[in-house]
Image: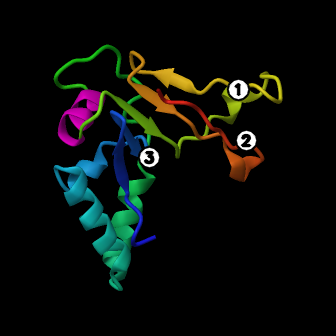
Amino acid sequence: MLALPAVALVDDHLLVHSDTTRYLEFGSTVEEVNAAVSAALGSSDTAVWLEFCERMSDRGAFRDAGTPDAGDPVSVILDALGGSALVHGHSTLTKYFAVAPADVVDVLRYAGGRVVAIDGGVYEGGRILLTRLA
């Protein structure tokens, strides 16, 4: 895990684990965030691990964000780390998929289409989700 990025910018999509702005507590660029997360994961200090887990367990920061605004959480993280859309997991969406056909599930786009949620809740018996971002 130490060698894997915590955040990545791919084809103008910012890929993150959790729907939180707390990545910005690790740094103000993709490179800074990834270096700080790698350092935290490589630490043997339990206080560092607890703080890391608290930050990455945060969720829901973008749920009330609508259209772009200079101060809204989606704009804040996209302006800092790049991209025009943010893609995240972490917040389980199984309730949205309960009535969908077994072979077709639409990912959840929200916050004016700037955020794509792709957590199907596999650990809860949900689905693994794949989607085209382009």
Q: Are marks 2 and 1 in contact (CB under 8 Å)?
A: yes
Q: Specify the amino acid type for callout 1.
A: Val
What's the magenta bit mostly, secondary-structure-wise?
helix
Nearer mark to the viewer, of 2 and 3: 2
> Residue at left 35%, top 51%?
7
Compared with 92, 24 (above or below) is below
Crowding at dot 2, Cα within 10 Å, few <14 / some 14-19 / many 20+, comes out as: some
Tag on residue 4?
none
* Picture residue at 19% right of the left edge, 33% below the top: 79
Depth check: 85 or 76 in front? 85
Which badge, 2 or 1, is on the more N-terminal residue? Answer: 1
Q: Is residue 80 magenta?
A: yes
Q: Nearer the viewer, mark 1 or mark 3?
A: 1
Q: Which residue is mark 2?
A: 127
Camera sees residue 93? yes
Q: Which residue is mark 1?
A: 105
Q: Would residue 68 appear left or right of 100 to someone viewing this image? A: left
Horizontal side of 37 relative to 128 (left or right) equals left
Q: Secondary structure at mark 3?
A: loop
Would residue 26 be seen by someone viewing this image from the given angle?
Answer: no
As drawn, the label of residue 18 is 3
- Dot 2 or dot 3: first in sequence order is 3
Q: Which residue is pictured at 45% across the width and 54% down the height?
A: 57
Task: Depth check: give the residue in front, 62 or 6.
Answer: 6
Residue 49's image quarter?
bottom left
Q: CA distance from mark 1 to mark 3?
A: 20 Å
Q: Is residue 119 left or right of residue 109?
A: right
